[in-house]
Amino acid sequence: MASTQQLKSRIRSVKSTKQITKAMQMVAASKMRRAQDATKGSAPYERAANELLTYLASQGVTDQHKWFVKRPVKNRLLIVIASDKGLAGAYNSNILRLYLAQLKADDASGVKNLTIAVGRKASQFVTRLKDTEVIGTYEDLPDHPEGAQFHAILNTAKDAFESGRVDAVDVLYTEFISSINQTAAVTRLFPAGFIETEVSDAVREAIYEPSIERVLDDAAYRLIGSRLFQALLDARASEHSMRMLAMKNATDNATDLVDDLTLEMNKARQSAITQELAEISGGAEAMK
């Protein structure tokens, strides 16, 4: 049995760790709430874009558009979104496992692939794989990636599809369903698609300037960008949620460990007291 002094030292160490994990849990919870609100912000915009594209598709404008044309998939670009930091439970392992499954499926189908890695964990992982061509890595993106890095990712994917270098572009990310439910998912950016919806009279009767083709270009680009943006927001919300749960579990485990160590220390102290009393009683009996 460990000495009382050793147990006291371990208890202090575990309590110090518990304070850190508790603080990280509270920070992650605060960031998750903000990220969760942000994931809902793009929904009205996407509905409006789907309505506009539904109307334009009914006019036959999307049939031969460069972003909507479907080709046999011989080359595919995968955009893998992971985190920059660890301590987020199974967040990174889930998305990287999905990435490996996609690579194996492509190999089995004879499809070549390129990769864009978003997040330090994804970058570190893909660089260790053999025969994987990485055309871009992006790290330390903010919670709202609206700047140059976001447009660099989007434009790289767009240029690769337009030039015929790839026939499809997919995003691998963690979909945020709720604070306790997140799922690794795949969504397609190119060729572009949309969800058919009811078209209002305002959209039907609108006059499109300078031309319907120009409006289609802008609407499609923004819709594709909103999907990539939504994937990044979902991934960040999922990361904060899983980190919050991981730190909560760590805090709970630290509490249980402190209780166990305290009980062990009390037993050790009681044993020492009992031993001392026995020695005193033995000495008193010997003096009689």
Image (spheres, grey):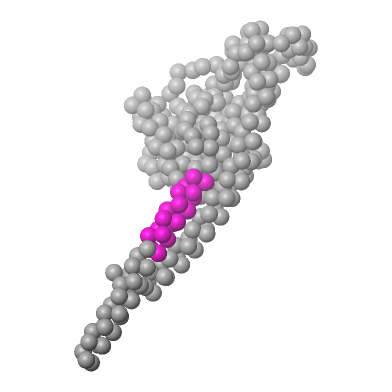
Q: Locate the C terminus and report the quarter of the image it occupies.
A: bottom left
The residue closer to the viewer here, 286 or 226, is 286
Let me know if residue 75 appears in the view.
yes
- Please state the horizontal and vertical placement of residue 70, each as a whole percent of the image: 51, 17
Q: Which residues are magenta?
A: 243-262
Chief secondary structure of the magenta span? helix
Q: Quadrant of residue 42?
A: top right
Task: Give the x, y percent position of residue 119.
Answer: 52, 44
- Quadrant of the image containing the N terminus: bottom left
Q: Is residue 193 left or right of residue 278?
A: right
Query: Relative to residue 113, is residue 202 depicted above or below?
Result: above
- Residue under the image location 42 percent in, 53 percent down: 253
Does 248 lie within the magenta span? Answer: yes
x, y percent for residue 259: 41, 59
Residue 69 is a magenta residue? no
Q: Residue at x 58, y 16 (%)?
A: 195
Q: Report which quarter residue 236 is drawn in.
A: top right
Quadrant for residue 47, please give it.
Answer: top right
